[in-house]
Amino acid sequence: MNCMSKIKDFQKVAFKDVSFADLMNKRIYNVLLIATEYDTFMLEDDGRVDEQIFNEYMSLSLRYPPRFTQVSTEAEALRELANRTFELIIFMPNMMEADIFGAPKEIKQQFPAIPIVVLTPFSKEVTRRVVNEDLSVIDYVFSWLGNSDLLLAIIKLIEDNMNAPDDTASVGVQIILLVEDSIRFYSSALPHLYKVVLEQSQEFAKEALNDHQRTLRMRGRPKIKLARTYEEATAIYDRYREHILGIVSDMSFTREGKKDMLAGYRFGQYVRETGPVTPIIMESSESSNREYARKLGASFIDKNSKSYPQDLREKIMRRFGFGDFVILEPETKEEIMRIKDLKGLQHQIFNIPERSLRYHLSRNHFSRFFYSRAMFPPAELLKQIDVNMCADLNDARQLIFDVIVQYRQMKNSGVVAVYQKERFDEYSNFARIGEGSLGGKGRGLAFIGAMIKRYPMLDQENFPVNIPKTVVLCTDIFDEFMETNRLYPLALSDISDEEMLSRFLEAELPKRLVDDLMAFFEVVKRPIAVRSSSLLEDAHYQPFAGVYSTYMVPNMDNKNEMLRAVSDAVKGVYASVFYRDSKAYMTATSNLIDQEKMAVVLQEVVGVRFNDRLYPLISGVARSLNFYPIGKEKAEDGIVNIALGLGKYIVDGGVTLRFSPRHPRNILQMSTTEFALKETQTHFLALDMKNMPTRFSVDDSFNLIRLGVKDADEDGALKFIVSTYEPHDQIIRDGYYPGGRKILSFANILQHDMFPLAKTLDTLLQIGQKEMGRPVEIEFAVNIHPQKRDRASFYLLQIRPIVDQKEMIDEDLKRVDPNDTILWSPNSLGHGISNDVHDVLYVKTASFDSSRTQTIAAEIEAINREFSGRGCYYVLVGPGRWGSHDPWLGIPVKWPHISHARVIVEYSLDHYRMDPSQGTHFFQNLTSCGAGYFTIHPSFGGGTFDEAFLNAQPALRETEYLRLVHFEHPITIKIDGRQGLGVVMKPNEQTQE
């Protein structure tokens, strides 16, 4: 028989995170203290009650200490109660009065919902009066013994009464039941009990991942309930039977209205009928009652013992699952091992002897270990293991391990943890080192993690959505690095980028990072991407994507070498803040360089290793707005560009496969055989895993290698992502077949749904846009093991908002006469109207030479520098792809070289046709900065460029390849981004008025 027959389909169980913020919602904020001045003074012990309670709360890391209001008479109390809200009344009776309980009874009659506690000094006279008084309307009577922590225990007891019903029902918070009718004794025992529980809640809260979680998790501590009669005890037990962590009971108390010397034993028998392994601690001043405790399988404490507080603490720690989990040999009770925390249990579960495992399982010690630490979901699951039906405990052992792993993965997901090197392991996801900001990328990644956790539909069994394991060095590390090494004078100077990097590499990172990084390397067995994450990067209205450096460091056997390489990469990212292009970008975006702060993201690289190189089978960029819809596609359907290899290839303008996630079978590039052969990816980027240069370069791709698709074929990487062109039949067949040219069509995935890539991207774009409140762009990678087609992993690498110009277009641009335009494009990116541009800079079609694009780029940079100096803007027009790193595909300019172009226009020539380069950081920057982007294909009716009109105008400047035309009056630029229409109007009389 299977001992886990009660546990159905564990693999389908998805632990839900406990919302600790929803616990302990009812609190005591204001306490009315009714006492004479003398009694108050005695209570305060020369100090204020508020201060005393505050100190007690702070010592136990508790929040929300209540405020005390002190009055001396019943009349004053009634006035306060009529005008203010109180959650608790503490009454200290004047012993000189004949009816010392008259006032609280009267107040209770008028305010029945407010708990009233009578707090009185202990004496024989008080005892006599209490015994002979009907106190049924009083919630509790306590005896003041001079112990200041009694007030805290009273407040917590009332709060536990208020919250226990909701907290046990919602998440399974546990109950400790104290059964005691001696006022003096429970006045002493309750503070001891609360001290143990609160200290242990502090201890288990240390397993939380950050300070905020630590504070909230303490709300999940066990609640304490006090019963003073047999009937009260059974009523509490019956109500909370499934949530009883343990019971502490006196032997003698009232039963059926009379003192019963064995009431505790009888209550224990009642409990044993339904809770055979519920921990019970029996207390008695009669040592002869030890035998009754033994019969119940209960522990025994002598109430007369001078070591009673220590005995109570020891028994609670051992029996209720607090403290270390001590694994025992069942017969001898000899300690075999000691487990301190969840991670320790995960590592030791397979080392626990079978006899001991059976012993602890049979007594619910494992579930109690989880319950006492407020880990309710796994506790509930493990409680269902029926050890009596187990022939072989290996299934149970594996289940405990799997439960711990799944629970830790769930807890780590979507949380920015404080990095602790001793606790960071393979189940940790995202952590921060430092107290500063995470920066733009760091914030985006943290947001992604939280988003994934909130939408369980993203966790598909064969295609889960994750973020790579990540640690962020916060901006305060950058500040310390700059100040300690006194780098700001150098950084703000005008030295070359190479000199800047060299000087930064000579500086030292804070020494405390060494141990943290070495521990990180032990966990992450993969290459590490060292990525910029500045304060301004990816911020709303602050487009800094792609401005700073990102380095990749291969995993090395020599961890000291890896430490050096990662440290140098971090310094290289820091240095890139002060490169010339970065400073030019700062100037172009009206930001101050000394306001920029840099965090650094250390992230495992997604990919599969093939011999001495590593790359993912799919990298991609997706946007929730598509400014180039075709067929049935709409702008709001989004757009995706994917490619083989590292994502930098896409960012740098390489040839990609472009599709709408809502129309994945509608791929223009695969519409004809000729088009597919011409527009397929032929090269890709991979990380060199063998040759890591000892000296870093300003070029952050210095250790990446450019490979041909044939190299990936030799690696065996193309099996699931290509189609095959058969030249004999001149057809393209979906899938990998021997011989024939391989076309990166990703047909098995997009056409035949091997994995739900398109659906996942569509869902992510919708969720991302909803959560961020604006259109978004995401970067991602997909890992597919070439030998395993049944499972792949989707990794979100980044999310950022797409800045959207809100200026309204009040006319239909479709009605504009092309004859009135210099440029007209049905494929435009951007949105808005501009009336402050006077210049058009264009590449002369007649003299264009694709072998001289680098020369053209240098000439454009010089002209742009002049416009930047004057604070003016221009329209830039040229053939091919602007910003391409391949000079044969277009003019290889960087953003700072064209930063003052208000509109960028790419057009195709009959002998020089290129697809638009949407999908790169370059164009994200253009649109974010308010620049428009036009694509024009005149030969296919895809817009017009009236070069003849410009040629007829006098040139302000002309070179072999460029011509700059200046107009006295401004030219009007209009872009309707939703329809994808853009025009640059010719100056006319109406414009000139």
Image (cartoon, rainbow, N blue to C red):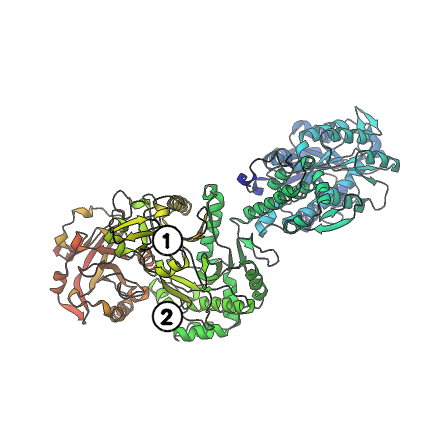
Q: Circle 1 sits in a helix, a strand or a loop, which is it?
A: strand
Q: Between residues 159 and 851, which one lies in front from this camera angle?
A: 851
Point out the image quarter for the C terminus: bottom left
Q: Is residue 544 visible?
A: no
Counting from the top left corner in percent of width and height, residue 588 is at 33, 64
Residue wearing tag 2: 580
Question: From the viewer's perspective, is residue 227 above or below residue 47?
Answer: above
Counting from the top left corner in percent of width and height, residue 667 is at 29, 48
Of all residues, the one furthest to the left in this rendering is: 952
* The label number, if any, that marks residue 621 in the structure image: 1
Residue 872 in which image quadrant: bottom left
Point out the image quarter for the N terminus: top right
Question: From the viewer's perspective, is residue 520 above or below residue 102?
Answer: below
* Left or right of 179 on screen, residue 842: left
Q: Amino acid at mark 2?
A: Arg
Q: Between residues 692 and 814, which one lies in front from this camera angle?
A: 692
Q: Between residues 383 and 453, which one lies in front from this camera angle?
A: 383
Between disc 2 and disc 1, the foreground one is 1
Q: Mark 2 or mark 1, which has the lower sequence index? A: 2
